Image (spheres, rainbow, N blue to C red):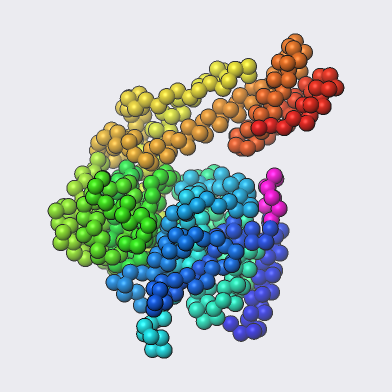
Amino acid sequence: MSVREQSQSGALSAASRSSCEAEEVAPGRCLSLLPWDRFSAWLHCVCVVGFDLELGQAVEVIYPQHSKLTDKEKTSICYLSFPDSNSGCLGDTQFCFRFRQSSSRRLSLHCMLDQLDRDLPVSLKKDPAYYYGYVYFRQVRDKTLKRGYFQKSLVLISKLPYIHLFHTVLRHIAPEYFVKNEPFLEAVCSDVDHWPPPVPGKTLNLPIMGIIMKVRIPTCHDKPGTAHIVQFTHQEDTQISIALPTVHEVDLFRCFCPVFFHIQMLWELVLLGEPVVVMAPSPSESSDTVLALVSCISPLKYCSDFRPYFTIHDSEFKEYTTRTQAPPTVILGVTNPFFAKTLQHWPHIVRIGEIKLPGEVPKQVKVKKLKNLKTLDSKPGVYTSYKPYLNRDEEILKQLQKGVQQKRPAEAQSVILRRYFLELTQSFIIPLERYVASLMPLQKSISPWKSPPQLRQFSQEDFMKTLEKAGPQLTSGLKGDWIGLYRHFLKSPNFNGWFRTRRKEMTQKLEALHLEALCNEDLLFWSQKHTEVETVDLVLKLKNKLFQADREHLPVKPDTMEKLQMHIDAIILALPDDLQDILLKTGTT
């Protein structure tokens, strides 16, 4: 970029920043924005990982410099930021990894991030125990270096699972970084520190080194399966802008091409939280395939661990490869041939060749038996003895095969496949949603003078009885052992995670209904008929209710909190002066 271009880029970024600041979100009760708070809302840090002849892979740069990473985290980043030597990745390679955070650290604007997180679909909510790493790796011949190769990775470390967004950022900045080095990296981070917060549901303008990315983060209120097109305004069309169709989705059809005929079986394995290992020739194929698998049960959240790229140096290597206990319920993406031997005891192995969109109809590949694993070849396939519960849906296979013959765009094929997975997951989950909703007590059983009633217990047998008349057959034509699939699912981590979330939501709804019932009572009249001790006790309880509703963001009607505060104020004013002073000063715990 010339000096003139840099000047134009700076002017564009400055103009964009002012527009970003105009759309600033101000969630009340949050701390003021400090330097690097905007950056921290999107990224934890940016790392540069190089190869040292004596040390091997090493973190050369961490930016911003105050970013904290433990030695264990740095080691993880080092090993996960380079492809295995056998991958032979010459040129530029992009991929993604995920690793455990070794200690909990709170950001200065954690309350804002928590609030934004609540509005996200469950599958996009941050996992406090993990970081994502987004990698742009370059390996080119360089005779001036002892090793004969230039090898370096630019890595974005973030809590956010926005794969497409961060890969797009890296494609734009990494090639220029490898030429201009650290001053360029500082300018990139400065741009990110002027981005608006990652608010779900809004069109966000994200300036980055001379362009503006226009993105929309999905919300939990979006109808599943609907796409929101990011619109350009006339004024912004004069600027260098790119609209991202998604922040988080991978190219689903491309990822599933090598195992095209087994998509439904793979959906079952992911739904049931079965241990799956993906063996691929490079980290790009490995990470894309693992992320595609995890996303195929959306809008359900995959609740177990998953590693888009996993190496023999990983801190969990021994834990995940031990033969002394059953394989853990995780999905691993690997590229090192050593894993073909180390993980051959795993029940489900997906072998992926080099991923490319087929120019002809994919050939059917049979499921290979586990006994063939010792001679695992490079041919794509699924190695398992698993027998699917549901009959195979031939219609979706014909539809996608027809698309290949007609040269339908890959994006359209992915949309069809994503809709198929969505409808399959919804058909499966709707009967569970309907049954769990029936566990909610009737509204008339909620009394303002008693604690909120409890949810009824989940009974597996009661649920099974509902399937005869209100099962998945109402929305899906697929035949098979649905009952067996549900029984297996009810023992899985995905069911536990889903039910925990639903139970929390319903409990909060009961608390909100209880608050509304209190608001509809004449509390001042009640207090006049009771002793001062009882009245003080009521005030303290009401204050705690308000505090709880605020802290937990209970789904109450907008005026409920105000009405309850008015009740509290009226009761306090009717008390003697000495008690008034005490109660007005008394906070909540």
Any part of residue 142 in sight: no
Instruction: Looking at this view, name the residue that lies furthest to the top.
Output: 529
- Nearest the camera: 22 or 62? 62
Is 36 on the left-hand or right-hand side of 371? right
Name the chief secondary structure element in magenta.
Answer: loop
Residue extending farthest to the right is 577
Q: Is residue 515 above or below residue 308?
A: above
From the image, which quarter does the N terminus lie in? bottom right
What residue lies at 70% left-to-right and 25% top-to-bottom? 540
Residue 188 coordinates in the image, percent (x, y): 59, 71
Q: Position of residue 484 (x, y in %)?
A: 26, 35
Tell me what residue is drawn at x 60 percent, y 72 percent.
Answer: 186
Name the residue at the bottom extreme.
144
Bounds of the magenta segment: 25-33
Q: Is residue 237 magenta?
A: no
Q: In front here: 257 or 93?
A: 93
**Is residue 42 visible to us here?**
yes
Q: Image check: 300 left or right of 234? A: left
Taking the spot 63% from the left edge, 59% from the top edge, the residue there is 38
Quadrant including the C terminus: top right
In the figure, 61 relative to 421: above or below?
below
Q: Position of residue 135 (x, y in %)?
A: 45, 67
Q: Residue sitting at 17 percent across and 54 percent down?
A: 368
The quarter holding residue 333 reads bottom left
The vertical placement of 19 against 511, above or below, is: below
Residue 524 lies left or right of residue 296; in this view the side is right
